[in-house]
Each structure stands twice: as C-alpha cells, then as structure tokens.
Amino acid sequence: MDALTALHERVSVPRLTGPAPTPEQQQALFRAALRAPDHAYLRPWRFLVIEGEGLEALGEVFGRAALTDTPDLSADTLARYQGLPLRAPLMIVAISRHQDHPKVPAIEQDLACGAAVNNMLLAAHAMGLGAVWRTGVLAYHPQVHAELGLASNEQILAFLYVGHPAGERKSVPALAVESYFSSWPAA
C-alpha cells in the first residue's frame, strides 16, 4: 500500500483478534515510530511491548488500580478492568519522556510521542493489520504508572492495541477539506 492510500484510508479498528503481528511486522511498527518528527532529536518516548501472559499481568495491574479507587468494586466490573488488555493480541504502551530543553517544551515532546503512535497506526494499516489508540482513566492512574515503572517525568500517551481486524473495517465519511482549511489572510 502506498503512503497516500494508507493516510487517506486508515481507520481505527476497535475489534481485534489474533494472531499477534509477526516479529517482522512488529519491527516495521517500531521502525515507523522512530521516524516521527522530533525537535532537537530528543527521542522523548519509550514503549512497552506487551503480549501473551504480559497482557494478563497488565490486566491485574488495571484491576488493582480500579480497586484502589473503588474498594467495593463489583466482581463483574473488576473482571472488565482485568480484561481490557485482552482486547488485542499485542499492546504497545507509548510513554512520553519529558526532558529539560531550552527550545523544546514538554508539549512538543508529547506531540512527538503522539506522532510516533500515529506512525505505528499508519504502518499497521499499510500492513493489513488493525489498530486502535486508546487511553482512558487508567492511562493517567498513579498506580498504573508506578507498576509500569514510569519515572516522574513520564506519562502514558497511548495504549495502542494491535492485531488483525475482527470483521469488516468501518467506513468513515469523507470530510469536506474546505470545512477545515482556509487561506490566511482571507481574500
């Protein structure tokens, strides 16, 4: 698939199934991430790659975090939290790593990490894989951060779920470009 087709046709694929991407496909995803725009070449990111039993272990982390907030959580709700990582055979946790730099504020570092995630989304689509970028309250939960080993200068920007589409890809409407782009100054 050429680059413009991937850009024009990519959609989030929330329903994913196995098998997990092959090691070669994973390397292609990782290499795509590392080509993201990055002011001052800070490489303000790191990624946790989770699959197999690691997904179940992350589910336990999610469950403990949920119980921290709501100790009397119902068994069904706890099971839902524990099952979140199992929505795909591969999860990549994108972590933005803020570094002190006189010309690159933290927001630009977060944007670079976000661009790396988007590059992986596009690469997954180009390879015929499905992927979806999720966050939610657990991405910001201090207990999740602690159990995943985040430093004080780090934050989770994405839980990137990757696998094979389970069913048809959804179609999204074409947007009118002129609704979002205009010339300045106006004529």
Image (cartoon, grey):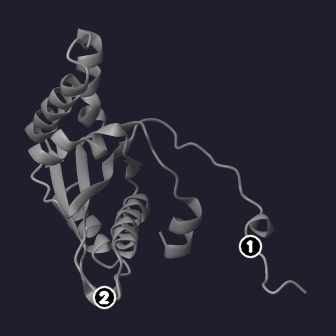
Say what secondary structure mark 2 lies in.
loop
* Residue at 28%, 65% in the rendered image: 29
**Position above or below: 164 against 74:** below
Rounded to the nearest whole Å, what is the CA distance between mark 1 and mark 2?
Answer: 32 Å
The numbered disc on residue 13 is none
Residue 20 seen in the current view = no
Left or right: 43 in relation to 119: left
Secondary structure of the residue carrying numbered label 1: loop
Q: Along the line of sight, which residue is nearer the eye, 166 or 92?
A: 92
Asked where in the image residue 110 lies, by quadrant, the reply is bottom left
Image spot of residue 172 (x, y percent): 64, 48
Q: Position of residue 96 (x, y in %)?
A: 27, 64
Q: Earlier in the sequence, mark 1 or mark 2?
A: 2
170 or 108: which is nearer to us?
A: 108
The residue indicated by pointer 2 is: 102
- Tag 2: residue type? Pro
What amino acid does circle 1 point to?
Answer: Phe
Task: Determine whether 74 is above or below 100 in the image.
Answer: above
99 or 43, which is in the foreground?
99
According to the image, label 1 marks what residue?
181
Write the residue at 52% across / 58% down: 10
